[in-house]
Image: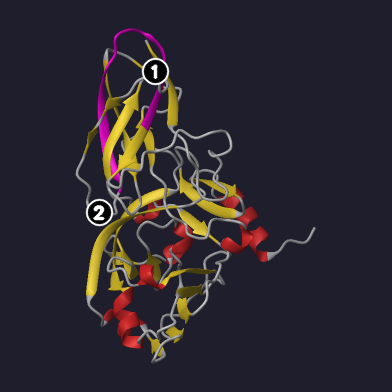
Amino acid sequence: MKFRRREFIALIGLAGAAALAQRYITGGIQSIAPASSTLKTREVTPNSEFYITQYDGVPSVDPASWRLVVSGEVEKELSLNLDDVKAYAETSDYNTLICIGNGIGGDLIGNAQWRGIRLRDLLETAGLKEDARELVLYGADGYVDSFPVEKALHPDTRLVYEMNGDLLPEAHGYPLRAVVPGRYGIKNVKWIERIEVTSEDVRGYWGKRGWNEEGIIKVTSRIDMPKGGGLITGRGYEISGIAFGGEHPITEVEVSTDGGKSWTDASIKPTLSRYAWTLWTYIWQIQAAGEYLLAVRATDESGRIQKEGTVVSRRVFPDGADGYHKVKVKVI
């Protein structure tokens, strides 16, 4: 049997990562998530534990010969090396990234501090022509995706070269990647080597394959403790987890201990930034032993309330999953 390169890499990943990671293949998107931890979620995800999504493996990029080319509907074409990019005003902030293929309660989400430059500063140097409409980003791995010029000019849309204080790891897009607040990972192109400004709408790699082209992050939340199937002793327990609204901060998290029949407000911790996930906790005063179905839901600043989800909408394809994360536990 003959395999294409992408298929071969996927098979190697399945065999080699079994002890440390789980590989998800959802609608063609291949991602690697860290093994579930028994500890509470950390506010900042270490680079080594941050999920990875690959189109065709990790490309080998020579920093000495690498260039970022900006072309298309611009007044002046640019060709920059990494030092040229770093000469622009620096910006640093925390952003949570989430894969559009992340299932309900999934691990394809992480929060990191990213350092780089504002994309709009680069575009101001190039000068956008009047009919500029879309930005198409090309990665060294052959991956392509796009988003509107308006999003590119947003002050918080960035090109980054550091992650959590370290040089951007190869698997996460070295030497340069996009961080686009409010958009699923498919829009956060890695290993960028060319940006083309176009006068037309351009569908990205996954858009051409049926995935939602806008890639707007849905409100989501997850229970991290307790784990499903866990045993709880005593009559008091701290339930905890994360919630995320993409471009809009989380303003409310509610927890249910009866599978969604009734809800109680959880406590939420102030976030590290507007675009970082929210950590939440709920002190559960347990009245009796027995089996319980815990659930969580969140609301963001814009008023979007997390959807309960149906059998169909809980599927990640084509625009990300809807649904409450629920875990069954037993109190003894």
Q: Is residue 77 visible?
A: yes
- Residue receiving disc 2: 274
| Quarter occupied by residue 116 | bottom left
What's the distance in space between the residues labelled 2 and 1, CA to CA? 32 Å
- Residue receiving disc 1: 258
Indicate the position of residue 324 as horizontal and vertical percent values: 43, 33
Element marked by disc 1? loop
Residue at horizontal 51 percent and vertical 43 percent from the top = 19
| Quarter occupied by residue 37 | top left
Q: Is residue 42 visible?
A: no
In magenta, the rendered stretch is 277-296
Placement of the C terminus among the 4 image quadrants:
top left
Element marked by disc 2? loop
- Which amino acid, mark 2? Arg
Most extreme residue toward the bottom is 76
Question: Could you tell me what secondary structure mostly forms the magenta stretch?
Answer: strand
Residue at horizontal 29 percent and vertical 34 percent from the top = 253
Indicate the position of residue 243 as horizontal and vertical percent values: 33, 41
| Lower sequence index among marks 2 and 1 | 1
Tell me if residue 160 is in the magenta stretch. no
Indicate the position of residue 280 as horizontal and vertical percent values: 27, 36
